[in-house]
Image (spheres, helix red, strand yellow):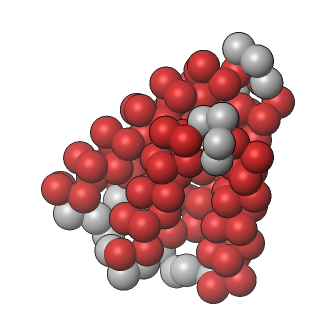
Amino acid sequence: MIKDSFNKIENMINSSKKINQEKKAVLLSLSKKLKGELGELAKTDIDQAKSVAHFTKITTHEHLRDKNNKKLLKLSNSGLKESIRDFEISHPDMTKLIDNICLILSDIGL
């Protein structure tokens, strides 16, 4: 499930016409690092790792779709942030990666 989610995330990023090549490269790099962090989390909490992967996929989808829906953007961002809330201390690198992904998606004017 986690690997599948990240394959979909990478496909969305690669096929998006909204993101320039530089931002795509950064997002793909962050995605790869997050996949590794979630692989580690999955060793101790598979359900939470799946939730974070799923919300990352949904959030990416909502930011990259042709017509954005502000309510869905807000909900997906909130869900992603909530899915990592309990890991800010135990998994700070994962939290920073999620924050960076959200920041880049928001900064590209989507």
**Farthest-out residue, left:** 22
Q: What is the count of numbered marks?
A: 0
Q: Is 34 positioned to the left or the right of 20 in the image?
A: right
Q: Which quadrant of the figure contains the C terminus?
A: bottom left
Residue 5 in sight here:
no
**Farthest-out residue, bottom:** 70
**Farthest-out residue, right:** 47
Q: Which residue is drawn at 36% across and 81% down?
A: 109
Hey, which quadrant is residue 100 in on the image? bottom left
Q: Is 24 positioned to the left or the right of 16 in the image?
A: left
Which of the two residues, 46 or 90, is positioned nearer the viewer here? Answer: 90
Residue 69 in sight here:
yes
Hey, which quadrant is residue 50 in on the image? top right
Hey, which quadrant is residue 68 in on the image? bottom right
Q: Which quadrant of the figure contains the N terminus?
A: top right
Query: x, y percentage for residue 7?
Result: 49, 33
- Above/below status of 95 relative to 38: below
- Above/below status of 75 relative to 7: below
- Above/below status of 72 relative to 98: below
Which of the two residues, 49 or 84, is positioned nearer the viewer here? Answer: 84
Q: Residue at x 34, y 50 (%)?
A: 27
Which of the two residues, 85 or 89, is positioned nearer the viewer here? Answer: 89
Q: Residue at x 28, y 64 (%)?
A: 19
Q: Residue at x 67, y 77 (%)?
A: 74
**Farthest-out residue, top:** 43
Q: Is 4 positioned to the left or the right of 32 in the image?
A: right
Query: x, y percentage for residue 64?
Result: 46, 66
Query: x, y percentage for residue 42?
Result: 70, 21
